Amino acid sequence: MPAFGQDTTTSANTDAFGECKARLADRAIAAGVSQQTANSVMADVEHLDRVIELDRRQPEFTTTFADYLGRRVNEDRISKGRMLLEQHSELLDRVTAETGVPAPYLVAFWGLETNFGSYFGKMSVPSSLTTLACDPRRSSFFTEQLIAALRIIDEGAIPAKQMEGSWAGAMGHVQFMPTVFLKHAVDADGDGKRDLWNSLPDAMMSAGKFLESMGWNPDYRWGREVLLPQRFDYALADGRRLPLSKWRELGITDAFGNALANEPIEASLVVPAGHQGPAFLAYHNFKVIMGWNRSEFYAIAVGHLADRVAGAGGLQNPPPEDVPALSRDAILDLQRSLNERGFDSGKPDGIIGSGTRSAIRKYQSASGLVADGYPGQAVLDKLGITTNR
């Protein structure tokens, strides 16, 4: 399919987008969308330059864990979450009874996704998805999402003109993508429609059903903050899952210094801000949360917000506030420097993934530093990496 840049004023680009819309309408009809819905919705679709800008935008700086968590789990959100937990207790208890997902987690997802329904996004979902489907970068994925959105309109869930969401097509109270909506959204209020925009019962039950489908275990929490002993081997924070009893043997305690339960439940160790920040043992439900959003930061934020909404206090070891937010260029320099010194971080891409963390850990160990795999200031200084604080 032809690419569409920011300048779509020329007749050639306009004609190409029109041809793309027609092809997409035909594909939707072939996939089972009614001809009336496909043609009427696609006739009103517009190319949104802003969507392409947002799709292409890469953040100049990475977000530190302290900044990420502080923006998402703050006193205002905790207070409002507790109020809504009480206000909607009957509904949330019903969702918990049917899906096994505790109410504080449902409130936490709601809070992180749309700030409790205060902002769903203002983009036309059909226009956003068509714009992205007609762009070659991720055309197949967004074509699938567009056809799903048309099927949602076809079933009468919401009129096309009211189908608004994020620039990438996420919709409603809990920001479901159209394919997730089709598979997991439910009509919980009995009005004959699956309405994630205007029906909180539909939205909360749908969120619970989605988490249940990914394997939510109602017998356990998401994870917990823990304390690590001195001279701990941070190589163990590489995603491996060990029984809680084994972590206990290694000297890990709960956040208050008490012994962990001597149980076989498996957990992985997560240290999102390195050895100077908090540590968490993450259980199976942590992986379920990451099925919603693949970010570890996000999963910790959901779990911690759920804990706070349920009445727990703050972290015993908050993340340090004075660590640098690395630019993508700084991360590229870091990766190149590690590679040049024989610590393979893979092809430099400006993203700190498992390969880069492993290379950092090996470099730290060889340099006499705490081998936590975190690009802290000591590592950056030793490698001569310049950052902007």
Image (spheres, rainbow, N blue to C red):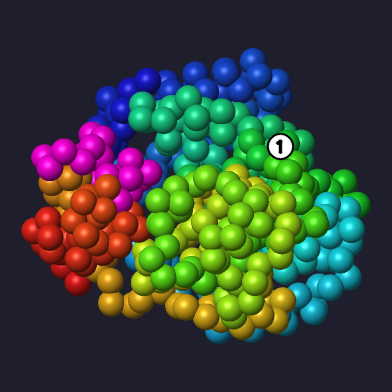
Q: Is residue 84 left or right of residue 349?
A: right
Instruction: Name which residue lies at 21% across and 67% down.
Output: 377
The quadrant the N terminus occupies is top left
Give the number of callouts.
1
The reply to whether the magenta stretch includes residue 347 is yes
* Res 355 → quadrant: top left
Q: Is residue 318 left or right of residue 147?
A: left
Question: Is 56 situated above or below 267?
Answer: above
Q: Is residue 354 left or right of residue 207?
A: left
> Which three-letter amino acid code belongs to the residue tagged 1?
Leu
Question: Is 93 situated above or below 48?
Answer: below
Q: Nearer the viewer, residue 114 or 319?
A: 319
Instruction: Name which residue lies at 36% across and 76% down.
Output: 320
The reply to whether the magenta stretch includes residue 136 is no
The reply to whether residue 172 is visible in this rendering is no
The reply to whether residue 252 is visible in this rendering is yes
Numbered range of the magenta stretch: 340-361
Q: Nearer the viewer, residue 28 or 119?
A: 119
Circle 1: element type: helix
Instruction: Name which residue lies at 70% across and 20% down.
Output: 32
Q: Residues within 10 Å of mark 1 (few under 14, many from 20)?
A: some
Q: Nearer the viewer, residue 238 or 327?
A: 238
x, y percentage for residue 346? 26, 35
Residue found farthest to the left: 384
x, y percentage for residue 79? 64, 84
Tell me the residue that label 1 is attached to: 182
* Res 152 → quadrant: top right
x, y percentage for residue 316? 52, 80
The quadrant the C terminus occupies is bottom left
